[in-house]
Amino acid sequence: MSIREEILTLRSALPDPVKLVAVSKTYPPEAIREAYEAGQRIFGESRVQELSAKHEALPGDIEWHLIGALQTNKVKYIAPFVSLIHSGDSARLLEEINKQALRCNRVIDVLLEVHVAQEESKHGWSEPELREYLGSGAWKELSGVRLRGVMGVATYTEDEAVVRAEFLRLHELFISLPREYGLGAAFDTLSMGMSGDYELAIACGSNMVRVGSLIFGQRNYK
Ligand SMILES: *Cc1c(COP(=O)(O)O)cnc(C)c1O
């Protein structure tokens, strides 16, 4: 199928509240334009430099999401335009996003990335660290950051039971954290599910899926 057909097929298969982030990392601007012309407006990138270059080159009504690990010294490059940062994984990073947001007179939407996978290499807060941070109330001082929800990446495995358990844990946190810490009505997004597991993620409560290779074809690096 063409990119256009993949987008249309996928969108019609997604239940209404589920947003599709088309993960365009490594693919050229022409591929993004084809998805754009099929009506797609939300695109996700992993790397700051690539995100900035594509933002410059492509239509202004695209919502750009940063889905990959973010170094504090690079926040300033995306703060003026980024719509959602999925990888809010430390107090230090949230503080820097806040600083750069205020500098641009913006409030930046951020998800709390939680580490649920078995692989050490994956990013995100451990549950105790996250609870300690939320309990400290430090996030309430960050007027340039709006915490919008939870993001996670499941273990890369064929074992569906493992993936399901991780998605259910993310869902449980998504439901319980706002009640326990008073995160408010804006905390409405649960970003989980990729090309290989987005259907399972939706069955476990995801309302934002990040799908790349299924739309754009195989890529050489993650
Ligand atoms: C690359 C990536 C995706 C998309 O992966 P696909 O398997 O190509 O759909 C989703 N989320 C994150 C965090 C990624 O890095």
Image: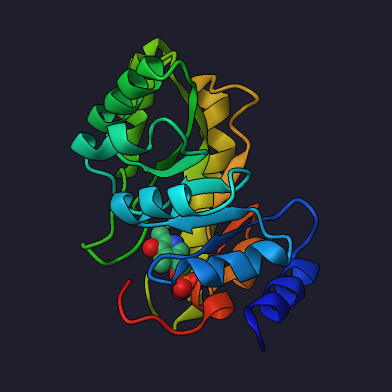
Whether residue 49 is visible: yes
Colour approach in the figure: rainbow
Q: Quadrant of the C terminus?
A: bottom left
Q: Residue at x 30, y 76 (%)?
A: 221
Closer to the camera in the image, 5 or 52: 52
Q: Estimate the x, y position of residue 175 in percent, counting from the top left.
A: 59, 39
Q: Quadrant of the N terminus?
A: bottom right
Identify the image quadrant of residue 79: top left
Identify the image quadrant of residue 28: bottom left
Q: Estimate the x, y position of residue 208 in percent, counting from the top left.
A: 61, 53
Quadrant containing ligand 1 reads bottom left
Residue furthest bottom as drawn: 1
Q: Is residue 112 left or right of residue 186?
A: left
Vertical order, 154 against 207 (above or below) = below
Q: Residue at x 29, y 51 (%)?
A: 49
Q: Estimate the x, y position of residue 45 in percent, counting from the top left.
A: 42, 57
Residue furthest top as drawn: 141
Q: Residue at x 37, y 52 (%)?
A: 53
Q: Is residue 189 left or right of residue 81?
A: right
Q: Estimate the x, y position of residue 16 in percent, counting from the top left.
A: 80, 55
Whether residue 154 is visible: no
Q: How many marks on residues?
A: 0
Closer to the camera in the image, 137 or 161: 137
Vertical order, 155 against 75 (above or below) = below
